Image (cartoon, rainbow, N blue to C red):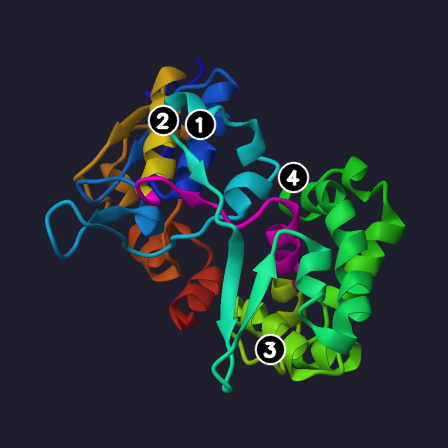
Amino acid sequence: MSKQYAYDAVVIGSGPNGLAAAITIARAGRSVIVYEARNTIGGGARSTELTLPGFVHDVCSAIHPLGLGSPFFRTLPLEQYGLEWIQPPVQLAHPLDDGSAMLLDRSVAATGATLGTDAAAYSKLMTPLVAEWDILSDAFLGPLRPQSLRHPFTLSQFGLRAIRSARGLATSTFKGERARALFAGMSAHSMLPLERRPTAGFGLVLGVLGHAVGWPIPRGGSQQIVDAMASYLRSLGGEIVTGMEIKSLDMLPSARVTLCDVTPHQLLRIAGSRLPSGYQRKLRSFRYG
């Protein structure tokens, strides 16, 4: 006799990744429940009143280009559940030592026009990648499948640049400090030294996103994204439990699959005894930042 399960899947953690996993499972017609330790969902996409009443702060993330640019998010009807995007006229500003600032415009040409002698080089770098963003995003952000590799030339042209260090790509591509500073600012989102590989990839992706879809802001804060995802999940029959910290897998109801949207050290505490010893060592030695 086959074993009976309370759920097809259990998800620990209600950040965007955990909710995305739960939605994917629910859309396949399977039962799923999400557990969140805090009283509010969202993880790094939470928003709350941290200072004055009615003054909402994003606790972690605030700007979400992949909210519009990722293959998965493009399939979600989140606008039907209250999500509204604000598109700023300028995507980012990078201050310079002389008191001026570099601006990333939605237009490649408008951005390049502020770069002086580097205008042509900037256009040569960005224009083809912006035009092929759908191909790139499906290949690098979607599920791994053979059809993702149907455009080898486009992927190789991106990959050969993305695998480099931000400093290496910027100095070999641009002559002036303004263009180099703009690219360095975007690459700094890697949280790695800009001399290291593949920091150029971060700068390329964020720059291309700025031109292809923008760097949108959810009206009302990042919380609106996960709240809309939660509403959509519930409409599919999914369940969410908040205020319940999972300290061990033994606390969970029976399920065919357990997914953990948690940090490495949290995963070690929750599921360490059931993980291979080699993987436990890797989790234990993980350093944040």
Please report contact status of discs 3 and 2: CB closer than 8 Å, yes or no: no
Mark 4 neighbour density, 10 Å: few (under 14) some (14–19) many (20 or more): few
Q: Is residue 92 left or right of residue 115?
A: left
Mark 3 neighbour density, 10 Å: few (under 14) some (14–19) many (20 or more): some
Q: Is residue 213 above or below residue 105?
A: above
The answer to which of marks 4 and 1 sits earlier in the sequence is: 1
Q: Residue at x 47, y 82 (%)?
A: 99
Please report contact status of discs 2 and 1: CB closer than 8 Å, yes or no: yes
Residue 232 visible, this angle = yes
Q: Is residue 265 above or below residue 65?
A: below
Task: Find the distance from the CA under tag 2 to the CA under tag 4.
Answer: 27 Å
State which region is magenta.
204-222
Task: Provide the secondary structure element on which disc 4 rests.
Answer: loop
Task: Find the distance from the CA under tag 1 to the CA under tag 3.
Answer: 35 Å
- Amino acid type of the residue that numbered disc 3 sits on in the rendered structure: Ala
- Amino acid type of the residue that numbered disc 4 sits on in the rendered structure: Pro
Task: Name the residue that disc number 2 marks.
Answer: 82
**Which of the two discs, 2 and 4, sits closer to the camera?**
2
Q: Is residue 132 above or below residue 203?
A: above
Q: Which mark is residue 143?
A: 4
- Amino acid type of the residue that numbered disc 1 sits on in the rendered structure: Leu
**Which of the two discs, 1 and 3, sits closer to the camera?**
3
Task: Name the residue that disc number 1 marks.
Answer: 78
The answer to which of marks 2 and 4 sits earlier in the sequence is: 2
Give percent across and percent down for residue 142. Answer: 64, 40
Residue 259 visible, this angle = no
